[in-house]
Image (cartoon, grey):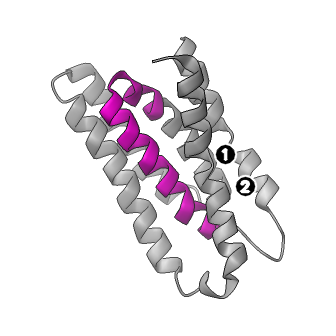
Amino acid sequence: MQFINYFFASIISFLGLLAGVILVEICPEEQKPLERFFNLSRKIILMLVFLFLFFYYANNIVYALILIGFFLFLLFMQYKISNLLKKSMLTYALLGILFYLSSKNTNLFVIESSLLFLYGLPAASLMYSRKEKNHYVLLFYNIGFVITANLAFFV
């Protein structure tokens, strides 16, 4: 895969956060009632990201163990860190590595890129606060996804 295609795919996957902010800006009255749905959909999409990667790398024990380790770390982190922005920052940095691992197969890459975009919608909808107008903070904290995904491409 060429780097320019990979780079733009990482940017588009990251823009799911911006789409989530726009979603809350359009209909802010729905943010509170749909909070439970956003939490559930975020967890389901994250599970799907790991499942697709795990099934692709199931025959390679080393990659499968790394994926299981990442998944267990994210589960542990969900309960230990209370600040949603810090939790999201670490999650997106790990998702950048998983984004790179999916680039070996074009079909898997398309699925993972789409899932990461969809993950950003509920994640940003949960973290965004209209009172504080924290959309710049939200995007800045999670830019680690683009950085780790593109650095992993060159390593």
Report the residue at 43% width, 33% height from top. Answer: 98
Q: Say which residue appears at 48% left-offset and 59% top-offset.
A: 79
The x, y position of residue 70, in whole percent, is 40, 37
Contact (Cβ within 8 Å) of mark 1 with mark 2: yes
Q: Which residue is mark 2?
A: 138
Residue 101, x across and y down, in percent: 40, 26
* Number of residues whose C-alpha sits closer than 10 Å to that of mark 1, classed few (under 14), some (14–19) or many (20 or more): many
| Image quarter of the N terminus | top left
Residues in magenta, as a range: 98-127
Q: What separation in Å lies between label 1 and label 2 (alpha carbons)? A: 6 Å
Main SS, magenta residues: helix
Q: Is residue 144 left or right of residue 54?
A: right
> Which element is circle 1 on?
loop
Residue type at tag 2: Leu
Which is more toward the observer, 127 or 111?
Answer: 111
Label 1 sits on residue:
142
Name the quadrant of the C terminus: top right
Q: Is residue 98 left or right of residue 13?
A: left
Q: Tell me the amino acid under the disc marked 1.
A: Asn
Q: Position of residue 34 (x, y in %)?
A: 52, 82
